Amino acid sequence: MSSGGSPKPKRKSVTQLPMRRGPLPDTAENRRSLARGVVLEIAASGAIRVRCSADAVGELDCDLLQTSGGPTLRLEPGASVLVFLPSGAEDRGVVIGRIGSDRRQEETPEALILEATTSMVLRCGESSITLRNDGKVLVKGKDVVSHAARLNRIRGGAVSIN
């Protein structure tokens, strides 16, 4: 018993596996479990159809390994991937990651529409822009600057300055 009179909780033993550094050993088992592949299609359900380069594998459906540490991996048909192969005929493979550099450039859309039913607020620090469903637009800030290279026009049923 500890000095407080209550028994110490028993610790559960945890088996810790040694961390492997460097490449995996070149064994038949390791060669069977990982393969390079090319994404063929991505189904609406999220299943990823991959053609693997490993012998006798061909095409298979895979899941995507989701990590919590970074951005979600975005794949498109034609992407080279590393696949953890299924152990049985009924299992699915797992796409572990993308092979090669990510050379995609973010495309700027022609139009961007954000929609809300009641109101929408864009806020940064002490400034905000609020759009309300009754048509009112509120612009708030310590200083509000309106700049136009040409004509800067203020229109309204009534215009109140100060």
Image (tube, grey):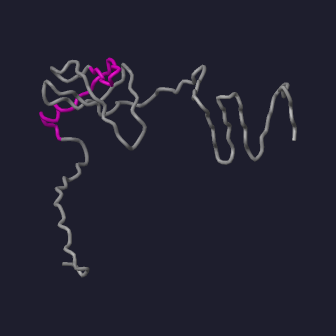
Name the residue at 37% across, 30% down.
100
Q: Which of the 4 image quadrants contains residue 46?
A: top left
Task: Give yes or no for residue 14 being in the magenta stretch.
Answer: no
The residue that appears at 67% across and 41% down in the rendered structure is 128
Residue beneath the point at 71% across and 32% down? 137
Relative horizontal placement of residue 104, taking residue 83 as reference (left or right): right
- Tell me if residue 34 is in the magenta stretch: yes
Q: Residue 9 appears at what percent x and percent y?
A: 20, 68
Q: Nearer the viewer, residue 55 or 141?
A: 141
Quadrant in the rendering for residue 99: top left
Q: Is residue 44 left or right of residue 84?
A: right
Number of numbered tags placed on the structure image: 0
Q: Residue 87: tell me if it is visible.
A: yes
The correct choice, above or below, for 38 with respect to 132 in the image is above
State the image coordinates of residue 129 (x, y, percent, origin top left).
68, 37
Q: Quadrant of the N terminus?
A: bottom left
Viewer-proximal residue, 50 or 91? 91
Bounds of the magenta span? Answer: 25-50
x, y percent for residue 21 = 25, 48
Q: Is residue 57 left or right of residue 114?
A: left
Report x, y in % for residue 72. Answer: 40, 35
Is residue 153 among what the camera can see?
Answer: no
Q: Residue at x 33, y 36 (%)?
A: 66
Furthest-bottom residue in view?
A: 3
Q: Nearer the viewer, residue 119 or 129?
A: 119
Look at the image and tell me in which quarter the C terminus lies.
top right
